Image (cartoon, helix red, strand yellow):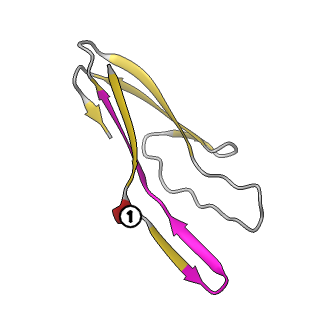
Amino acid sequence: DIQIKRESLKDYARKTVIGSSRREQRVWEITVKNNKPQNIFITIEDQLPISKLNDIKIEQAEAIGATVDEATGKAQWELEMEPNETKK
């Protein structure tokens, strides 16, 4: 059994309004737990926000340890995990 949880970290989320523009920052944490009795290799994928509109600008923060396709916003992590190991 493998558990995967994606949750918003409220402590790091913030909104700011400057003139007519608005800025938002959101932080997510992905937790993976290997409950199997053997090692596993797993690929985790997530979608980072992208915009095709000139009025909306998105600055990507770090997706630590991920390979990110800038055109599509797809982030991918390749993990090797021991039995009962948890990674964030």
Q: Could you tell me the amino acid type at mark 1?
A: Tyr
Q: Give the quarter of the image for residue 20.
A: bottom right
Instruction: Give the tally of numbered discs.
Output: 1
- Above or below 13: residue 60: above
Give the image location of residue 39, x and y in percent.
29, 16
Residue 23 included in the magenta stretch of the image = yes
Q: Residue at x 38, y 33 (%)?
A: 4
Residue 77 on the magenta segment: no
Residue 84: % across, % down: 22, 24
Position of 50 with respect to 83 (left or right) is right
The answer to which image quadrant residue 10 occupies is bottom left
Examine the rendered structure and indicate whether residue 49 appears above or below residue 37. Answer: below
| Residue bearing the label numbered 1 | 12
Residue neighbourhood size for the residue with mark 1, other residues' Cα within 10 Å, grouped as few (<14), some (14–19), many (≥20): few
- Relative to 10, is 86 above or below? above
Residue placed at 56% from the left, 56% from the top?
60
- Quadrant where the N terminus sits is top left
Question: Tag 1's secondary structure?
Answer: helix
Main SS of the magenta part reads strand
Instruction: Pick the quarter of the image with the C terminus.
Output: top left
Among all residues in the image, which is located at the extreme bottom?
19
Residue 30 higher or lower than 18, as above or below: above
Q: Nearer the viewer, residue 26 or 60?
A: 26
Q: Residue at x 24, y 28 (%)?
A: 85
Q: Which stretch did the figure color magenta? A: 17-33
Which residue occupies 70% across, 65% down?
56
User: Which percent across, then down, holds residue 35?
Assistant: 26, 21
| In-image side of 61 versus 79 (left or right) | right
Provide residue 21's location: percent of width, then percent of height. 65, 78
